Image (cartoon, rainbow, N blue to C red):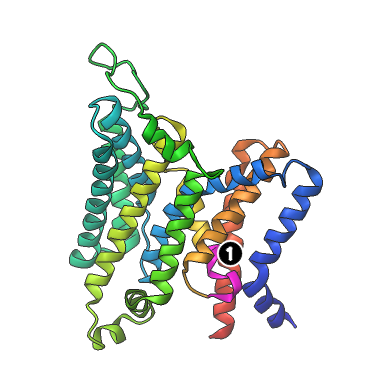
Amino acid sequence: MKEKLIGFLYKYGAVVLMAVILVYFSFVNHAFFSYSNLSDILRSISIVTLLALGVTFTLIVDGFDLSVGATMSLATVISSSLMVWYEMPLWLVLLLPIGVGILVGIFNSILIVKIGIPDLLATLGAMYILTGIHRTYTEGYSIYSHMPLTAGGTAPGEFYKSFLWIGQGQIAGVPVPVVIMLLFTAIVYWILNHSRWGRILYMTGGNAEAARLSGISVNKVKFAAYTVSGVFASLAGILFAARVGSGQIDAGASMLMEAVAAVFVGFSVLGAGKPNALGTFFGAALIGVLLNGLTMMNLPYYAFEIVKGTVLVLALAVTYFHVKKRI
């Protein structure tokens, strides 16, 4: 009976928890289940979902990327500074931060694949380096339109309306960040479940030696996974800057735990038992719904970390206890 209960929780626990949370908050606050509030929830999780999709790729190849939060912060301040400080065209404002994300992914890959540093240690070091870089670059200040400069005077530029539309606009009544999130989730789902590259990623993470004997270049696959992670972190940073209309330093620091929790919650969605795109999206939605409901109940913001940590611990406990029982 105990094993059946664990198996049920592993397969349907996240879905049942989501249903219970939705029903509970709907009774507590009638405004919770309104279109505007649900739209706000989806908009709020769009950034975390992009960040988590990058982490998903590294977990699939049996790795882990702790630097995604710092990469996101760096992309946020770079995209903001290109408009406010340098008045660069929009295409450069979008492409340069993505290029930085690619470089971060390459840097992590070199540390992990070429030098052989364990992924947690390598990306932890990268996280500190990137945090230092973006704080040095901004001199510790957030970036906003026509901000005063430390050298004197004010910044010449401002956030472009076309850029802000990415984070604040709508398409047929649907927030643009939600459209972007759903689009990338669908693309990643197709890649992981219906493409040759997806099969190669799962083979590499499942058994690297068997994959190598099958002719797969394991190092190249891991290299690609960490590069993709850097790109998604940069996309999250761009979306964050467009949503809040400023380049906040350490913007991604608070979202790292949410992204990691979303991925691990996704392990157990419908018994997937592995990192997957739909599970990651569902995990981000679960955390987003929970935090939104608690906010409407006036829970102090400083208690949110307890909630995030509890969700992560519960997801890990159910997942690894189920795996232990199978072994």
Q: Position of residue 280 (x, y in %)?
A: 51, 62
Q: Nearer the viewer, residue 227 or 131?
A: 227
Q: Position of residue 322 (x, y in %)?
A: 59, 77
Q: Position of residue 311 (x, y in %)?
A: 60, 57
* 206 relative to 35 in the view: left or right: left
Residue drawn 65% across and 41% down? 36
| Total numbered labels placed on residues in the image | 1
Magenta highlight: main SS: helix
Q: Secondary structure at mark 1?
A: helix
Q: Report the residue that reaches farthest toward the front.
A: 172
Q: For residue 61, which quarter of the picture?
A: bottom left
Q: Nearer the viewer, residue 308 or 173?
A: 173
Range covered by the magenta-colored residues:
264-272
In the depicted structure, whether residue 7 falls above or below residue 190: below
In the depicted structure, whether residue 287 falls above or below residue 80: below
Q: Quadrant of the N terminus?
A: bottom right
* 34 relative to 197 in the view: left or right: right
- Is 271 within the magenta? yes
- Is 182 within the magenta? no
**Does the rendering let one see residue 257?**
no
| Amino acid type for the residue under numbered disc 1 | Ala
Q: Nearer the viewer, residue 322 or 214?
A: 214
In the depicted structure, whether residue 119 falls above or below residue 237: below
* 318 relative to 82 in the view: left or right: right
Residue drawn 22% across and 77% down? 217
Residue drawn 26% across and 25% down? 85
The residue tagged 1 is 315
In the depicted structure, whether residue 220 falls above or below residue 129: below
Q: For residue 205, which quarter of the picture?
A: bottom left
